[in-house]
Image (spheres, rainbow, N blue to C red):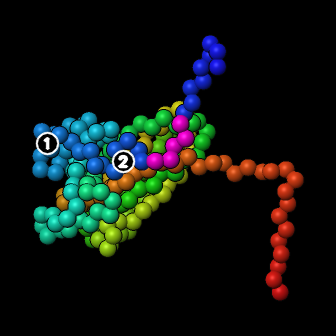
Amino acid sequence: FGPFQLELIPYLDDLLENGDFEEGPKTSELKKTVIIGKYSLPEWEISGVVEWVSGGPQEGGFYFPIPRGAHVIRLGNEASISQYVEVKPNTIYSLTFGATRTCAQDEVLTVSAGDMSSDLPIQTLYSADGGDTYAWAFKTTSNYVEVKFHNPGMQEDPACGPLLDHIAIKELPMATYTKGLRFIAVGLF
């Protein structure tokens, strides 16, 4: 390319960094399952009570089935996790992730990227496979975007809060028009 180098942003189609949460905090950064320290969860910034939970039997008679891997993140009241991702400007991306409701109370997850956000009600309550898969699309306006998952709830039981796992991102190609092609609708009578 001569004296000028083009910096290419890679095509995104995989887990976010530590998006499966299999890389956990150091033992010194955990108080039972609660993560201590804003930057203690590798590749993520946390706020509030965020837990690194293993699948299987839990205190209080709970059982967390985890379909992918051995660990998930549980977001307590007003807790969040976030990560900055390099993206292409003016491009549409999709975030996919597994989410599980842990209590019979209403649970909502706020997902945001850049200046876009949505509140997603978490429907599952201990399904056989450990959670539903959600997809959420957003359009970028800059080279970096902060991807954030936030539990806005104020549950009475502090053991409640959505579980998150397997967070991935995929670039969605824009639909294009090819000149000269026509589609003919054929009706069946």
Q: Nearer the viewer, residue 161 or 144?
A: 144
Q: Is residue 150 above or below residue 66?
A: above
Q: Is residue 40 visible?
A: yes
Q: Position of residue 98 (x, y in %)?
A: 38, 59
What amino acid does circle 2 point to? Gly
Q: Which quarter of the image is occupied by the N terminus? A: top right
Q: Residue at x 26, y 41 (%)?
A: 41
Please rate how many residues cluster around mark 2, counting C-alpha atoms within 10 Å: few if below 14, some from 14 to 19, many from 20. many
Q: Position of residue 95 (x, y in %)?
A: 47, 51
Compare marks 1 and 2 and give the one earlier in the sequence: 2
Dot 2: what SS?
A: loop
Query: What residue is disc 1 on?
Result: 27
Q: Position of residue 28 (x, y in %)?
A: 12, 39
Q: Nearer the viewer, residue 57 or 6?
A: 6
Q: Nearer the viewer, residue 132 or 148?
A: 132
Q: Main secondary structure of the magenta part?
A: loop
Q: Is residue 143 above or below residue 170?
A: above
Magenta-colored span? 10-14
Q: Is residue 139 above or below residue 88?
A: below
Q: Which quarter of the image is occupied by the C terminus? A: bottom right
Query: What residue is disc 2 on?
Result: 19
| Rendered image: mark on residue 14 | none
Q: Is residue 11 magenta?
A: yes
Q: Residue at x 19, y 60 (%)?
A: 159
